[in-house]
Amino acid sequence: MARIDPATQEALLERVRFYRDLGLTEFYRRPVDAALLAQLAAEPIAQPSSPIPNQDQGMGAPGLASETWDSASQTQTLHEDEATSPRRPVSAPPQVAAAVPASGHAAALQIIRDEIGDCTRCALHKGRNKLVFGDGDPNARLMFVGEGPGADEDAQGMPFVGKAGQLLNNMINAMGLKREQVYIANVVKCRPPGNRTPEPEEGNTCSPFLFQQIDVVRPQVLVALGATAATYLLGTRQPLAGLRGRVHAVRGTQLIVTYHPAYLLRDPRQKKEAWADLQIAMRELGLKLPAKG
Ligand code: URA
């Protein structure tokens, strides 16, 4: 048997676990031979890039209106993962598509929208009023990805227009940006009944359209809002706590993982943590960080 170093071994084990979660169990019941290990080792494994320490979490973003964005929160007590992680596996994201020139981004997004059409690919269409494709600047440097439309979004056909959307707007403004300057989309385009987490077959059916949107917009920084977005973007389910506070490489862009605004509405103390995540995004984008106070 070939000798492998502990880091490679752990990476291989992680990959085996991933396949096991997908239901592919046969290959690891067979004796694992050197050729298989070598083959697995040669395959690319999605790894987080450079860990970045949390920045000063005492810095406050401006306090704002009803869905107030105020980072003066306390220590972490709840894990969003418990509420929103899919329990069953997600598909590995497909290959990154070839770049579309900036002048063609809007038209390319329209082609994706047309391709989705009056979608009946999964059961979510049955309860849909309006399909929620995405919103914002087709050439945005920053893109946010949520889970799926809620009642307000389903009524208006636009992502993040309800209470969580107001908070997201305030978060964007605190970064020194306007909502029109970013692009926003969801893992699923139709509202799950009762705002439940999308089932894997729903997320797996719809998320390829999200990947196409990302490949067209090609943002410099992606922000996954919550565990569901992080799971589908990374193609692997991991606790949110372990994904926050660093930059991941996804589809040729940098991915930051943070809490979903709906979760922050339920537990405002976590806003401080989310603000630390957003500051990582700001740093990657070269945006002016607030003075330490
Ligand atoms: N929550 C989401 O994940 N997406 C929306 O568009 C609205 C609420």
Image (spheres, rainbow, N blue to C red):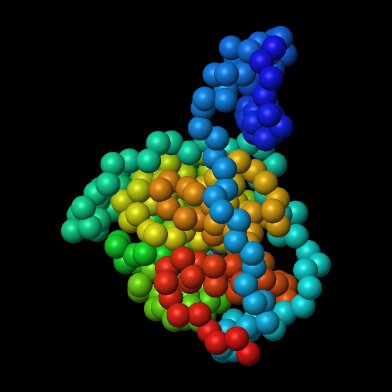
Q: Quadrant of the N terminus?
A: top right
Relative horizontal placement of residue 238, taking residue 130 as reference (left or right):
right
* Circle count: 0
Quarter of the image for residue 38 reads: top right
Q: Is residue 131 left or right of residue 137?
A: right
Q: Quadrant of the C terminus?
A: bottom right
Q: Is residue 142 above or below residue 46?
A: below
Residue 13 occupies quadrant: top right
31 and 210: which is toward the camera: 31
Q: Residue at x 21, y 53 (%)?
A: 101
x, y percent for residue 125? 47, 47
Q: Is residue 57 above or below residue 143?
A: below
Say which of 212 and 46 sits in front: 46
The residue lying at 47 percent from left, 48 percent from top is 250
Residue 255 position (above or below residue 97): below
Residue 23 showing in the rendered view: no
Residue 154, above or below 115: below
Q: Residue at x 29, y 62 (%)?
A: 139
Which of the two residues, 179 or 153, is positioned nearer the viewer here? 179
Visible residue check, residue 247: yes
What's the residue at 36%, 64% (across, down)? Answer: 141
The picture places residue 94, in percent across and down from the top left corner, at: 43, 36
Among all residues in the image, which is located at the extreme left?
103
Q: Percent from the top left, x then y, of residue 148?
A: 53, 56
